[in-house]
Image (spheres, rainbow, N blue to C red):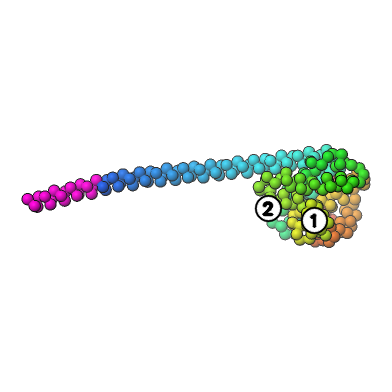
Amino acid sequence: MAGSVALSQALSYARDLKSLYESSRVRERELEQTQERLRNAYQQSLQYAIDLRKTYRRLQQAIFQSLLGLANALEAKDPYTRGHSERVAALARRIALEVGVAPGAADTIARAGLLHDLGKIAIPEGLLRKPGALTGDEWAVMRQHPVVGAQIVAPLEFFAVGAVIVRHHHERHDGSGYPDGLRGALIPLGARIVAVADVYDALVSDRPYRSRLSHAEAARLIGVEAGRTLDAHLVALCIRLTGDAPPQHSV
Ligand SMILES: [Fe+2]
């Protein structure tokens, strides 16, 4: 009798154990399915994030292209500045590569060269084309253009370095420039490069008050500024590069 009770209990335990085992297997499968669903959801949201990032980058590039178009349109209105930024960009890239800047960074410097005067869009046309000397107040307005230009390109995340170059392209080696009066090596290298290219191209371009200068005359004048308002090493490179292959003028 006692033996039969013990057997019946043992069978009951075994049934309970089996039932427990089966229910734990069911939960395990449910857990696996939940994990699988979570993995899929994670992959999907990752893909959404990647797609969103790509769209955002494409949007930023499109805005950059629009700003280039705007800068071109601004220059094209004035025969004296037409093509200036493209020449500054090309020369700035050559100087940058010559000084040892990596190609990608030289590209950014060239792009900043394309947009360096974009801020002039905020300067009244009468002031931009004024044939005579500017008054003190007019100069104060004109000096805003690097800051305005940097503000316009500021939302472009990929162009943060370029925005800094745009802001500082009128700083001078001796600290007498604007907007921040930076001096020497405190001026970002890209801005120093664009400054040299900007001054050289202005010298070899026609202006309302004078004809374009020869390379030799421009080299002499820019040489005077070496170590004063412009970085001497970059001036030397600019003179050598432009002497090897003077830039083409469309004006
Ligand atoms: Fe400028």
Q: Quadrant of the C terminus?
A: top right
Q: Residue at x 78, y 44 (%)?
A: 119
Q: Residues within 10 Å of mark 1 (few under 14, many from 20)?
A: some
Q: Where does residue 63 sit, x and y in percent of width and height?
A: 68, 41
Q: Where does residue 221 sit, x and y in percent of width and height?
A: 89, 56
Left or right? Give the position of 33 relative to 141: left
Q: Nearer the viewer, residue 136 or 157?
A: 136
- Precedes in sequence: disc 1 or disc 2: 2
Q: Residues within 10 Å of mark 2 (few under 14, many from 20)?
A: few
Query: In the picture shown, does residue 55 fall above or below 222?
Result: above
Q: Which residues are magenta?
A: 1-19
Which disc, if any, is residue 104? 2
Is any part of residue 79 visible from this angle? Answer: no
SS category of the residue bearing label 1: loop
Q: Does residue 9 show up magenta in the picture? A: yes
Q: Amino acid at mark 1?
A: Gly
Q: Nearer the viewer, residue 228 or 135?
A: 135
Which disc, if any, is residue 226? none
Q: Nearer the viewer, residue 102 or 146?
A: 146
Q: Amino acid at mark 2?
A: Gly
Q: Nearer the viewer, residue 143 or 172?
A: 143
SS category of the residue bearing label 2: helix
Which disc, if any, is residue 181? 1
